[in-house]
Amino acid sequence: MSLAPDVSVDAVVDLCNNYSAADITALCQQAGLLALRANTHVVKIANFEQAARSIKQSQPTQMQFYQ
């Protein structure tokens, strides 16, 4: 599975502000599954955006400790 040309690392980072590593993993896996459901092997930015709507931060209050 590969990324579409419209996917930039900066765009994905903007979608997962203050996410934990597990949250980012879930986001990427969900985006890949959405691409497969669309019968394609290329993950588009729209897949990441849709996945971001369903993946929520696991522990938003703990992130404040590090700021």
Image (cartoon, helix red, strand yellow):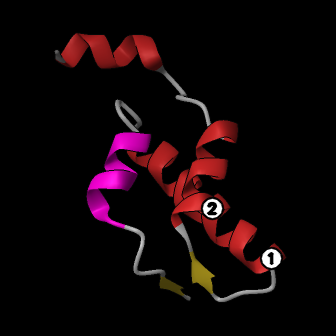
Of callouts 2 and 1, the N-terminal one? 1
Q: Residue 32 placed where, x, y %?
A: 63, 71
- Residue at image coords 33%, 48%: 13
Q: Quadrant of residue 30?
A: bottom right
User: What is the secondary structure assignment of the residue under circle 1?
Assistant: loop
Q: Nearer the viewer, residue 21 or 51?
A: 51
Q: Which residue is mark 2?
A: 47
The quadrant of the picture occupied by the N terminus is: bottom right
Going by the image, does 5 lie left or right of 43?
A: left
Where 60 sits versus 40, above or below?
above
Q: Residue 19 placed where, x, y %?
A: 41, 36
For the stretch drawn in magenta, the main secondary structure is helix
Where 31 sits versus 16, above or below?
below
Q: Nearer the viewer, residue 34 or 65?
A: 34
Where 36 sits versus 48, above or below?
below
- Residue at image coords 16%, 15%: 67
Going by the picture, which residue comes out furthest to the front?
A: 6
Residue 34 painted magenta: no
Q: Which residues are magenta?
A: 8-15
- Residue at image coords 58%, 43%: 52
- Residue at image coords 57%, 75%: 43
User: What is the secondary structure assignment of the residue under circle 2?
Assistant: helix
Amino acid type, label 2: Asn
Going by the picture, which residue comes out furthest to the left?
A: 67
Figure label count: 2
Q: Which residue is mark 1?
A: 38
State the separation of the CA atoms marked 2 and 1. 10 Å
Marking on residue 51: none
Image marks 2 and 1: residues in contact by CB distance under 8 Å: yes
Amino acid type, label 1: Ala
Residue 12 painted magenta: yes
Circle 1 crowding by C-alpha within 10 Å: few under 14, some 14–19, many from 20: few
